[in-house]
Image (cartoon, helix red, strand yellow):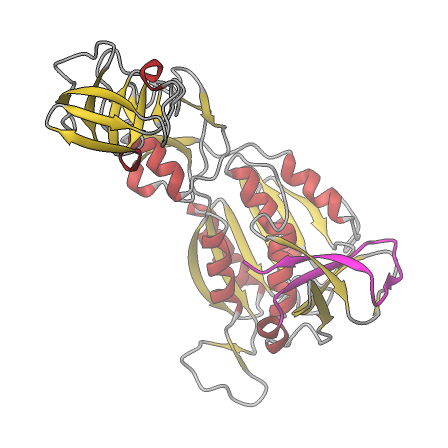
Amino acid sequence: MKPFFQVQDVEQVHAYARALSPLPAEEAPLAQCLGRSLARDLRAPHDLPGFHRATMDGFAVRAADTFGAGESNPGYLQLVGEVHMGQAPAFSLAPGQCARIGTGGMLPQGADAVVMLEHTRLLDQDSVEVASSLAPGANTLGPADDAALGQVLLPAGHWLRPQDLGLLAALGQETVAVRRRPIVGIVSTGDEVVPTSARPGPGQVRDVNTYTLAAQVRQAGGEPQVLGLVPDQAPAIKAAAARSMQSCDLTLLSGGSSVGARDFTREVFLSFPGAELLVHGVAVSPGKPFLWVRAGERHLLGLPGQVASCLVAFYLLVEPVLERLQGRPALPFARFPRLPAVLRRNLPSAPGREEYVRVALRREGRLWRAEPLFGKSGLLTTLIQGQGLVRVPKDSEGLYAGDEVDVLLFP
């Protein structure tokens, strides 16, 4: 067993996450798949769109009949029919003929291009003047232009977006094989913590972490189960953890993970059958007192009680676990866009640990300037005022004003 509070590198925590097996797959209705992770590669079950179709309103033509046509030298074609939407044309085009067609219509046999309506003029009921020269395939889609039978369209682990659901609908996928959402139990501890509906007494604070963690879990693709507030008592902590382990893949307990006489979390987590201590302490700020105990297929994670530390520790250390359980790479800050910026002031840091500093952003000409927001881990306002985080590397003594940095933008 590792000594108590043996600090490990962030990369070692991520290595533990990468070693996890994804959760089982399940078939989910298409309408419920937004934000879900594909359990296997999605291959096209057929060509898409499956037929030659127009992408513009105009006239279906044989491209060769338009060669050389232009404003000063128009061509003339015989109008022989009209394509009706949702129907296969009952006629074909011979040389010198054309047919009226709308966007999405199926090209008649013999046609291989569509001349745009604005490049034509109807001379009479049977004659069309064409003022544009077309190449074969112009303003059309081929049968397999969107997707070809057997083509891998989306890889396993892909996070399904609204446009992906549209593609699945076009392919007739009423259900999709996705990874089961991780179920995450959330427990807040502390004798000083009271419900949000209560008026705090002297030395008391309202419960913040339950709401921020539940929102972060949803954002990361999990299903939070709020298990309520628990006092700083070992039996109460163990009872809450045991309830969570009955139905949850992960248990997140905020508070009680640091070195202190009243912190029972480590002992409680290790009291479960088969429990193994993976991490207790990470070389990072904020978030150093992170705890991870594995008990069979369940995972018990202890997070700092201070809200800023808890929030950053989730994105850096918990989100990679949720990512991997959903079949994706174990990446921290998975949903954070990156924005290049320039530091406005020096940013000192202690070597030997990674540090994540909240920053406010301001546009100055073509550059973004990042202003560090210094404050203790219990402050909420610096989280609200900041637009993102700047990482100070482990072996660095800090960053300097004018340094270029990548800002991890809060999602």
Along the horizontal axis of the image, is 375 left or right of 66? right
Q: Quadrant of the N terminus?
A: top right
Question: What is the x, y in percent for residue 329?
Answer: 60, 37
Residue in front for this viewpoint, 388 or 320: 388
Relative to 202, residue 321 above or below? above
Q: What's drawn in magenta, residue-wise? A: 386-411
Task: Look at 83% across and 65% down and name the residue there.
Answer: 402
Relative to 2, residue 345 above or below? below
Question: What is the x, y in percent for residue 124?
Answer: 12, 29
Residue 35 visible in image: yes
Task: Look at 50% across and 38% down and name the residue there.
Answer: 326
- Residue 404 lies in magenta, yes or no? yes
- Residue extending farthest front: 72
Q: Quadrant of the C terminus?
A: bottom right
Relative to 388, residue 120 above or below? above
Residue 288 visible in image: no
Relative to 337, residue 361 above or below? below
Along the horizontal axis of the image, is 16 left or right of 141? right
- Residue 171 lies in magenta, yes or no? no
Along the horizontal axis of the image, is 12 left or right of 163? right
Residue in front for this viewpoint, 365 or 234: 365
- Residue extending farthest bottom: 202
Question: What is the x, y in percent for residue 96?
Answer: 24, 13
Task: Look at 52% across and 89% down and name the residue there.
Answer: 201
